[in-house]
Amino acid sequence: MKTSKEAYDAFIFHCKYEKKLSSKTIKAYETDCIQFKSFVKSKFKHETFITDINKDILKLFFYHLKELKPKTLKRKIATLKAMFNFLEYEDEILINPFRKMKVNIKECIVLPSVMSLLEVEKVLLIASNEITLCKPKTYTYFEKLRHLTVLELLFATGTRVSEICNLKIEDVDLVTGTIRIMGKGSRQRIVQVCHPDVLEILKLYRSRLSKKLIKKGYFFVNRLGTRLSEQSIRIMIKNYSSKAKINKKITPHTFRHSFATLMLEQNVDIKYIQVILGHSSISTTQIYTHINNRKQREILALNHPRILINSVLNKG
């Protein structure tokens, strides 16, 4: 019979070395387990075994977390479910406390912020103009060129910022215009870069990578030749959106949302958008149909035939 601590450790070991989950997922699981372990410790005066934990303890824990956002709470519940399913499978517990529990957390649909084509054009134009102000052989020129390449790639492919940062030299094929992306859950996908301007910028940036930088392996590198960080891209985008006087929060993910929304507005089948974005489930992609519905309301509010009839009658 395992103590609670031994059970948590066994679960994390399973996630790390048997399921080989990402470091980000492991960190989230560890955080959730530590929090649950602390809560259980506060309820018992003696050392607890994993078999001491029943659905009543779980209900108290969920009530304890009632102030959290639904998305965060759902993640913590999912972590504990995964742990107890693992322990049941390993015969460490006879009864899984989740078996006779119904936990229903309603999560509000929050529509992601998107950029208009004009706003995207402003950002790209500013980034492009800044390159012309730099001397070609300086690091500043390379940096500005890298900025524009990242921006163009984010908007042209709808990739996640982490996927951009993890691109390797060999992942970018400038002959065929294809990019191999390693997405969530180690799912690999190929995205086409079809626009000639984007390809031209990619080729120009690639030509500026020295042999020293190429040996590092990553396609986007910083001054030290190491992998460009997600935070660097976030700061860069914040600066450009400020220069473009865009009065809303713009992040790397905003480019992804904008890409998907504009594709949907061009009547691209949502299944194709799902594949390009690397969503494992169509339900994740369907958030963009809500955005499209909002756009439809705006169009109908301004251009509804009834409005046209009224305008004709008023003129008469």
Image (cartoon, rainbow, N blue to C red):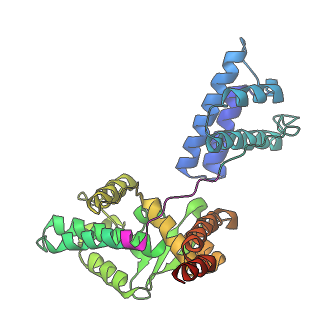
- The quadrant holding residue 219 is bottom left
Q: Is residue 141 above or below residue 48?
A: below
Q: Residue furthest top?
A: 45
Tell me what residue is drawn at x 53 percent, y 58 percent: 112
Which segment is the magenta one? Answer: 109-120
Q: How many marks?
A: 0
Q: Is residue 68 left or right of residue 120?
A: right
Tell me what residue is drawn at x 35 percent, y 68 percent: 150
Can you say which quadrant of the picture contains the N terminus? top right
Percent position of residue 228, x then y: 34, 59
Tell me what residue is drawn at x 44 percent, y 86 percent: 194
Tell me what residue is drawn at x 24 percent, y 57 percent: 224
Is residue 113 visible from the viewing direction of this image? yes
- The quadrant holding residue 226 is bottom left
Percent position of residue 283, x then y: 69, 63
Residue 47, magenta (yes or no) = no
Can you say which quadrant of the picture contains the C terminus? bottom right
Question: In this view of the protein, which residue sits in the foreground, 276 or 90?
Answer: 276
Q: Is residue 22 left or right of residue 132?
A: right
Q: Is residue 10 above or below residue 259?
A: above
Q: Is residue 32 left or right of residue 240?
A: right
Q: Is residue 19 left or right of residue 218?
A: right
Q: Is residue 80 above or below residue 115?
A: above
Question: In this view of the protein, which residue sits in the foreground, 66 or 93?
Answer: 66
Percent position of residue 180, x then y: 49, 75
Percent position of residue 256, x then y: 49, 66
- The quadrant holding residue 82 is top right
